[in-house]
Amino acid sequence: MWKICNDILPSLDRLLTKHVNLESQLCVLCIGRQETTLHLCRDCPFTRAVLNSSQTLDHVCFTTETDSLSVLDWIKFCSGKLTTQHFDMLIFLLWGVWKERNSRVWEGKTKTVGDVVLLSTSRLQDYIFHNSCSISRGYRNIGVVRWKCPPFGCVKLNIDGAFDIASGTGGIGLVVRDHSGQFVVGKGRPVLGLLSAEHSELLACREALELIVDQSLQPAIVETDSLIIQQQLCKAGVNLSRLGRIYDDLGVLLDALPNVRIMHTRRDANIAAHLMAAEAVAVGQPLFYSSVPSFLCNVIDAELCNH
C-alpha cells in the first residue's frame, strides 16, 4: 500500500520509465489494457471481480465519483468511506491481486478470482487473530477468556453473526467441537436484508439449533458472544420486539430440545465462529466444512493447546 500511494509499485508502466526493456506493456491479468498502477488496483476486470466479492467494496470503490480519481486520491476516498474492517479487506485483496500478478509473471501459475479472494481473506483473518493474541498477551492477559471444551459426551456450537449497517448485509457462522476440542463441522453463509447485528446473531442461533436437530447433536451447548441473545432466549414470555417472531420460534424449538443450553461467552472465546462468519461474507456463498479449513487451523490449534 505504501508503494501504491507513493507511485513506486513496479508495474509495467513504472518499469518503462526506468528504461527497462519490456516484451509487452499489457496487463498480465486481463491482456486488455496497459498495466499501470491505477489499472492494477482499480480498473482491471480481474481486480474488479476480486473486489466485487464484497458488496460494500463494490458500492464504495466503483462509482461515478471515483472514475476520474488518481490512484492516491482513490485510496484516500475509500479509506474515508469504508469502516476499518472493510478497508483492511481492501488492502489485503489488493495485495492478493498483486501477488497473483507476480505469480503469473514469474512462476507461470494462474489462480481464479475465487482463489485470490479466499487466500487474501484467510491472510487477513490470520493477521487479525495473531494481532489480537499479541495484544491480549501484552496488555490484558488477566482479563482474557479462553475457549473451553464442553463436558464429556457433549458438543459445543460456537455461533456469531456479522453485520454491515450501510448495506444491511452480513453473514453467520458456526463451529462445532466435541468434548476433546476436536473440530466436528463448520458452517457459514452470507445474509441479506438484516435489520441489526442482533438480527444476524439470532439467525446464527437458528442455524445452530436446526443443525442440532438435523444431526442429532444433543446434548449440546450453543455459545454466543451476544448477551442479549442469550438473555432473551432464556427468558420466559412473548418477545414484543421487531425480531420477536424469530425469538418466539426459537423458544418453541428450544422447548423441544431439553438437552440444549444457550450460554454467553466473551468475544475472546468465540474467535472461530467470528472468522467463519467473516469468511462467508468475504466469499459470498454458503460454506460447509467437515474438516478444519485453512483459515481456522491456527485458531483451533491454539484453543486446543489451552487444555
Image: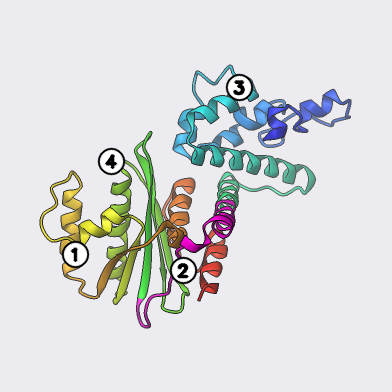
Distance of label 1 from label 3 (alpha carbons): 52 Å
Image position of 248 (left or right of 183): left
Specify the segment rendered in magenta: 126-154
- Residue 39 covered by magenta stretch: no
Q: Which residue is mark 2?
A: 290
Residue that carries the numbered disc 3 in the rendered image: 73
Amino acid type, callout 3: Asp
Quarter of the image that includes the N terminus? top right
Q: Are marks 1 and 3 in contact (CB under 8 Å)?
A: no
Label 3 crowd (10 A; few <14 / some 14-19 / many >=20) = few
What's the residue at 83%, 25% (across, down)?
Answer: 16
**Which badge, 2 or 1, comes first in the chain's sequence?**
1
Q: Is residue 47 left or right of residue 248?
A: right
Look at label 2 and name its amino acid: Ser
**In terms of secondary structure, where does tag 2 sit?**
loop
- The residue that label 1 is drawn on is 253
Residue 156 location (% of width, % of height): 37, 71
User: Residue 150 lies in magenta, yes or no?
Assistant: yes
Mark 2 / mark 4, whichever is N-terminal: 4
Mark 1 to mark 4 CA distance (whole Å)? 22 Å
Between marks 1 and 3 in the image, the one whose residue lies nearer the viewer: 3
At mark 3, the secondary structure is: helix
